[in-house]
Image (cartoon, helix red, strand yellow):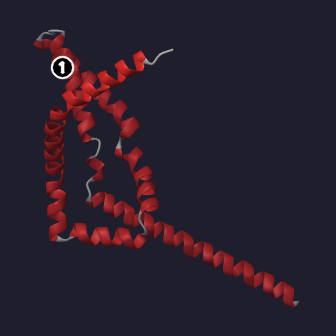
Amino acid sequence: MSMLRVFSVCTALILSLASVAANADQASHARNAERFLQLANADRLAVPVYAQVQQMFAQRFAETQAPENKKALLERYQAKADTALDKAIGWKKLEPELVNLYTSQFTEQELAGLIEFYESPLGKKMLDKLPELNARSAQLTQKKLEAAVPEVNKLLAEMTAELDTQKP
C-alpha cells in the first residue's frame, strides 16, 4: 500500500470516528436539555393558554345566555379547541424545538449544572415558588405601571401635537 493510500484511509477513519463522537455528544447534550426541561416543568408552559381559551369559550357561552341544557355543546367545543391547541402548541410539538433552543444557548456542562441545581432542595424550592413569584412580580409591575400611564399618555399627546404643528 502506498503511503498516500494509507494516509487517506487513516484520515477517513479518523473523520468517521470524530463524526460518531460528535453525534454521541449531541445526543448527550439533547438528553441534558430534555432532563432540564422535565425538571423545569416545561411541559406545562402552555397550560395558561389552554385555560385562557377554555375561559373564552365559557364566557361566550355565558354571553349568549345559552341554557344550562346546552352545556354539552360548550364542552364539545372546548374539547375541539384543546385538540387544535395540541396540534399547534402541544408538548410533542414544543419539546423538540425547546431542546434545540436550550442546546443552542447552554453547553452540555451548563445544562448539567442547571440539572444539578434544580435537583437540589433549593432548586426544587425555586421551581415550586417560581410560578407564584412570576405572578406576583407581574402584579407589582402592573401596579407601578398604572402610576406612569397618565404621564406617558400626556407625553404621547404632546408629541402628537408637536408633530401636527410641524407639518409642512
Point out residue 144 in the picture as x, y percentages from the top left corner.
15, 39
138 or 54: nearer the viewer: 138
Query: Residue drawn at (21%, 30%), measured in percent from left and top?
Result: 151
Image-based side of 11 in relation to 121, left or right:
right
Point out residue 68 in the picture as x, y percentages from the top left corner.
11, 14
Compared to 6, does 51 lie above or below? above
166 or 44: nearer the viewer: 166
The image quadrant of residue 107 is bottom left
Can residue 1 be seen here?
A: no
List the single residue furthest toward the left: 68
Compared to 40, does 137 lie above or below? above
Query: Residue drawn at (35%, 37%), measured in percent from left and top?
Result: 86
Quadrant of image for the N terminus:
bottom right
The number of callouts visible is 1
Mark 1 falls on what kind of element?
A: helix
Q: Amino acid at mark 1?
A: Gln
The image quadrant of residue 106 is bottom left
Can residue 66 be seen here?
A: yes
Compared to 156, does 4 lie above or below? below
Q: Residues within 10 Å of mark 1 (few under 14, many from 20)?
A: few
Image-based side of 28 in relation to 117, left or right:
right
The image quadrant of residue 113 is bottom left
Query: Residue drawn at (41%, 58%), measured in percent from left and top?
Result: 102
Point out residue 119 in the picture as x, y percentages from the top left corner.
22, 69
Query: Residue drawn at (35%, 41%), measured in percent from left and top?
Result: 90
The residue that disc 1 covers is 59
Image-based side of 48 in relation to 28, left or right:
left
Image-based side of 85 in relation to 9, left or right:
left
125 or 65: nearer the viewer: 125
155 or 56: nearer the viewer: 155
List the single residue furthest toward the right: 2
Point out residue 100 in the picture as x, y percentages from the top left corner.
46, 56
